[in-house]
Image (spheres, rainbow, N blue to C red):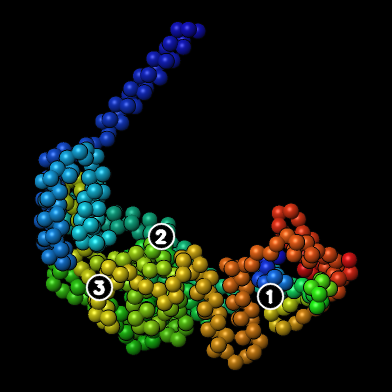
Amino acid sequence: MISQQKFTTVIIVLLFLIVSLSFSQEKPKIDAGLKEKTINKICKMLTENYVFPETANKISEYLKTQSNTNAYDNITDPVEFGEILTSDVQSISKDKHLRIRYSPEDAKRMKESEGQRPDPEREKEMLQMMKAENFGFKTVERLSGNIGYVDFRYFGDEEVIKETVASVMKFLANTDAIIFDLRLNGGGSPTGIRLICSYLFGDTPVHLNDLYFRPTDETEEFWTLRKVDGKKMPDIPVYVLTSSFTFSGAEEFSYNLKNLKRAVIVGETTGVGAHPGGTMPVNNDYVIFMPGGRAINPITHTNWEGTGVTPDVPVTSEKALETAYVIALKKLADNIKDDITKKRYLWLAESITASINAPVLDEKTMQSYTGTYGNRKITYDSASCITSAGKDKNML
Amino acid sequence: MTPISEDTFMFKDLDYFRLRIDKDANGNVTGVTGLYDNGDKESSQKTN
């Protein structure tokens, strides 16, 4: 028995050592040489590609100063080094798109595919992943009062999402207002933004946004499409919900519709990121998201970098849906002549308002309401719950 | 029952109906009135 215990202990110690050794072998470390090479390459890439050359120079100067003053000397974890570099480049640029990440797998894949046509297998995998997430569309719903609601988490490329968008917009085609929930939307493709915006304007193309790219010195214009799969809804009231998480392409969607006075933005100031770009390999270990472009709105001639998109109706993101819902119902009530329908909209608006600002009644008041009222009975229990039940099962 | 004011309540999943507590001039509860979103009402006196 004792020898068996000793044997078991030895096994456990051995296993622990093996696991410890394998962990120590698996956890990579970064040396001074790789850190210096990574910084130099990032500086070169920024100088050649970053949307603002002067800012690129400032970032480069800062990174080199940091390196020369030994700021990175104690870092041995390559992941941490990427995070600190990101923090440092963003401290100068204030550009949240500009990010450096330790990922030998992505760096290797990108380097191997440079100058080559996209790998069909990889594209198939990506498509499958997007399908599994319904191309970002999480919820589409018809709320009471015939208000449409759609919650989606990113904007895929137009060609990839158009069938899903068509099905979503067809579902919403008979609603009297639409609420687009972008509170958890991190952005995406400008062609996807254009596609969804196109449902909200008439047949005449509307200038939504321009994207200028420094590496090619070209500007791409984005106008609404003349035709979409489904019904265009140029007159339907539109509301966009935002949060501080709403970022990049989701901000463009909000900014476009706000400046075209096509939507009311309800929620929080957005996350601040107006510089599109793409991920590039730095070396065999690191990749960088390089913002090579900037949005130029045709109305404001600028964008939301540095400010975010400010809401028309500022409210915490938690209350944005109910707030927009109430505004939508009141607008519908204002615009309808039929008195009964108007009362129903206002009735519903009052209920929604109460759901987020319900008054708190004291126990004495609630106790005073208990009793029998003809066929109806009101009871109150210690869990502060007041209920009403009719003798007839269909009666409240 | 969720209060929307001190004397009016709404019900989850029944957005067309509310219940109002009726009181006399002294604040004593005298009955309830069921309110419907189409304007219909039905009152019941307190019996117990």
Q: Earlier in the sequence, mark 2 or mark 3?
A: 2
Other-residue count near label 2 (Cα within 10 Å), few / some / many at <14 / 14–19 / ≥20: some
Disc number for residue A295: 3
Outermost residue, top direction?
A2
Q: CA distance from mark 1 to mark 3?
A: 46 Å
Q: Which residue is mark 2?
A: A131
Q: What's under tag 1, amino acid-wise?
A: Tyr
Q: What's under tag 2, amino acid-wise?
A: Lys
Is residue B32 visible to us here? no
Left or right placement of residue A66 versus residue A236 in this view:
left
Q: What's under tag 3, amino acid-wise?
A: Ala
Left or right placement of residue B30 versus residue A328 in this view:
right
Residue that appears at 38% across and 68% down: A269
Q: Same chain for the residues at labels 1 and 2, yes or no?
A: no
Other-residue count near label 3 (Cα within 10 Å), few / some / many at <14 / 14–19 / ≥20: many
Q: Position of residue A79 (x, y in %)?
A: 26, 44
Q: Nearer the viewer, residue A376 or A64?
A: A64
Outermost residue, front direction?
B26
Q: Is residue A92 above or below residue A169?
A: above
